[in-house]
Amino acid sequence: MAAGEIGRLDFPGDRSFAAAIGDLLGEKADCIVNAANGMLAHGGGVAAAISRAAGPALDEEGRRIIREHGPVPVGEAVVTTAGRLPFKGVVHAVGPRMGEGDEGQKLKRALLSAFARAEEREWESLSFPAVSSGIFAVPLDVCAKAYVKAAVEFFGKNPGGSLKTIRLVVFDGPIVGHVKREIEAAMGGRDASRSSASRFEEP
């Protein structure tokens, strides 16, 4: 594995999902995902860091989206400019807050929406943070499972798409162990694409 990687799943067509400890803003990717709220108000955490680094253009476009379309529903994602950041765009994924119910499925849906927005633009690489694990307080084991499920499902349904590299980028902390266990369970000691697909097939 590359330096800082927690784990990796490889899929047919030279596609991969990897998780790593690092700085999201330093990623070499076509786009990054912002852990957003429905109003695209970037008040704290990763969202605030992205907003500060991107400059006013990102916030201005977010306000325009809200004016024209209303709040972004939980489980959905929209794209704005990356402003001063060296990305083609920022994908704002609205994950659930703890207590809403069905948090794992809602989080997986938010990430699948983010991946779809990148695919629509024919971007090849995407990096995302630990959505819903901070102030939204979704338990880390639920988050880790949703992150891996989303990547497995996306690559399973889009074997010939443009998006080839998906990376989860997290800070060093308790989330690391949860993500590592989910990736190892998905691999199951066999080929990653086969084992992960069978493990995460919905009943």
Image (tube, rainbow, N blue to C red):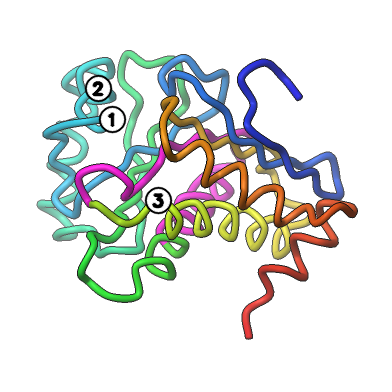
Specify whether residue 9 is painted magenta. no
Crowding at dot 2, Cα within 10 Å, few <14 / some 14-19 / many 20+, comes out as some
Specify whether residue 121 is painted magenta. yes
Mark 2 lies on a secondary structure that is helix
Give the amino acid at mark 3: Leu
Q: Are marks 1 and 2 in contact (CB under 8 Å)?
A: yes
Give the amino acid at mark 1: Val
Q: Which mark is residue 46?
A: 1
Crowding at dot 1, Cα within 10 Å, few <14 / some 14-19 / many 20+, comes out as many
Crowding at dot 3, Cα within 10 Å, few <14 / some 14-19 / many 20+, comes out as some
Residue 203: % across, % down: 63, 86
Mark toward the start of the polypeptide (3 vs 2) = 2
The residues colored magenta run 110-136
Residue 172: % across, % down: 44, 25
Q: Is residue 9 above or below residue 26?
A: below
From the image, tell me which residue sits under label 2: 49
Q: Nearer the viewer, mark 3 or mark 2?
A: 3
Q: Give the image quarter of residue 125.
A: top right
